[in-house]
Amino acid sequence: MKNIKVSGRLLEVPASPIRKLVPYATAAKKRGIKVYHLNIGDPDIKTPEVMIDVLKNWKDNPIAYGQSQGQPKFLESLVGYYKKLGYSFVESKNIQVTTGGSEAISMALFAVCAPGEEVITFEPYYANYNSYSKINGVKIVPVLTKGETGFHLPDRKVIEKKIGKKTKAILICNPSNPTGTVYTKEEMEMLVSICVKNNLFLISDEVYREFVYDGKKYFSILEYMKKYPDKMILLDSLSKRYSLCGARLGMIVSLNKDLTDGVLRMAQGRLSSGYVDQAMAEKLTEVDDSYFKAVHREYQTRRDLLYKGLKSIPGVYLEKPEGAFYTIVKLPVKDSEDFCQWLLEKFSYKNGTVMVAPAAGFYGTPGMGKNEVRIAYVLNVQDLEKAIEIIAHALVEYNRK
Ligand SMILES: Cc1ncc(COP(=O)(O)O)c(C=O)c1O
């Protein structure tokens, strides 16, 4: 019998650099080793109680489909959220609820590009942009940013050089996963101006909007949306903001009616996002500001601890991340993927080891990021201290091999 083949394009979808070492971590745990997970941005912070109460008091039976655009009450809560941020021009009709920010990324790429068209983004970038561009037949054109400049943007001409006939959009993540960079007003204005001049969409993934440290001022794409309603697209998510990763809720916000109409037709094809999830999340207007203040304080403390701890390890290089809860770290190793696997397979210190993500998967250019890892500081302070101690000992032992 002839073997049936899956599609060539399926084979092109890359494995997530964040998840691909999971089998080694599982094996380490089976050997009784505690694995400190610095590989994935799944916060340990509690979901707001007002949301959990919805689940505790759930009565609706059966659990029905929701509406394709999103549940009206949830949409209203989101309008309230953007209004509180100062963007009262955002109305329900400008919002499409998605199944996580992940679906928002995929739908936005599908919406702005025909197969073979291009999107410029800044490497290192969120690795799943690779998956979603492959799924949608879109080509990612990377522009390199460097650790030494805190992964801030290069000159305008470096970016404009990458614009060709097939370029449809610039995609940014601000604050950035994986670098922790928060773009300045000047950088945002440069991007907006490049997009306006070259007739491109500017797509901004702002799922970490609340995670900006040291009182740094944050410039959302929403600042420019009213002036350039057809070109600005916001991708958003509740996963990190309210510790709702498993609720799978995100959104696309745009004033471009062709885009929101089209995206809604796509959304109709997948019927709806989670009905229970939205019922829970519509309580976001009742979440007290003290929740964010506590979460913010906690992450800034973790960031400070991680930065200081890692910087004190010989041969390790990083800039202080300005936002989100990630950082790209240069290590004194040749092949960080080998190091990450070795940590899980062969190493333990005080019966613990750490899982971090090799950074190569966050670059579009082959060969980049080979001596870097991405670290997510999603552990409490005590565990983070232990994880840093493990990394310090591991580097000594690994380099002695
Ligand atoms: C930059 C960025 N965008 C989007 C997402 C998607 O998140 P979700 O699908 O949970 O909303 C993530 C998740 O880690 C992310 O880091």
Image: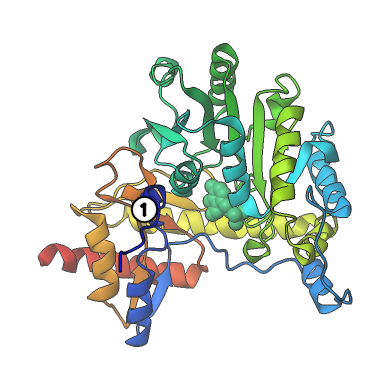
**Amino acid type, label 1:** Leu
- Residue 230 visible in the current orientation: yes
* Quadrant of res 29: bottom left
Establish if 75 lies above or below 302. above
Observer-nearest residue: 55 or 315?
Answer: 55
Q: Which quarter of the image is occupied by the N terminus?
A: bottom left
Residue 241 drawn at (x, y percent): 67, 54
Residue 172 drawn at (x, y percent): 53, 35
Observer-nearest residue: 386 or 136?
Answer: 136
Query: Label 1 crowding class (10 Å Cα cut-off): few <14, some 14-19, many 20+?
Result: few
Residue furthest toward the left?
401
Establish if 338 lies above or below 360. below
Q: Is residue 246 left or right of residue 70?
A: left
- Display colour scheme: rainbow
Residue furthest toward the front?
1
Q: In this view, does 70 lie to the left or right of 113?
A: right
Residue 170 drawn at (x, y percent): 52, 28
Give the number of callouts: 1
Residue at point 87%, 76% (across, down): 61
Q: Mark 1 points at which residue?
A: 11
Q: Is residue 278 left or right of residue 154?
A: right
- Residue 324 visible in the current orientation: no
Ligand 1 within 8 angstroms of badge 1 C-beta: no
Residue 140 drawn at (x, y percent): 43, 35
* Quadrant of res 22: bottom left
Q: Which quarter of the image is occupied by the C terminus?
A: bottom left
Which element type, helix, strand or loop, lies under badge 1?
Answer: helix
Observer-nearest residue: 285 or 254?
Answer: 254
Q: Is residue 389 left or right of residue 332?
A: right
* Quadrant of res 151: top left
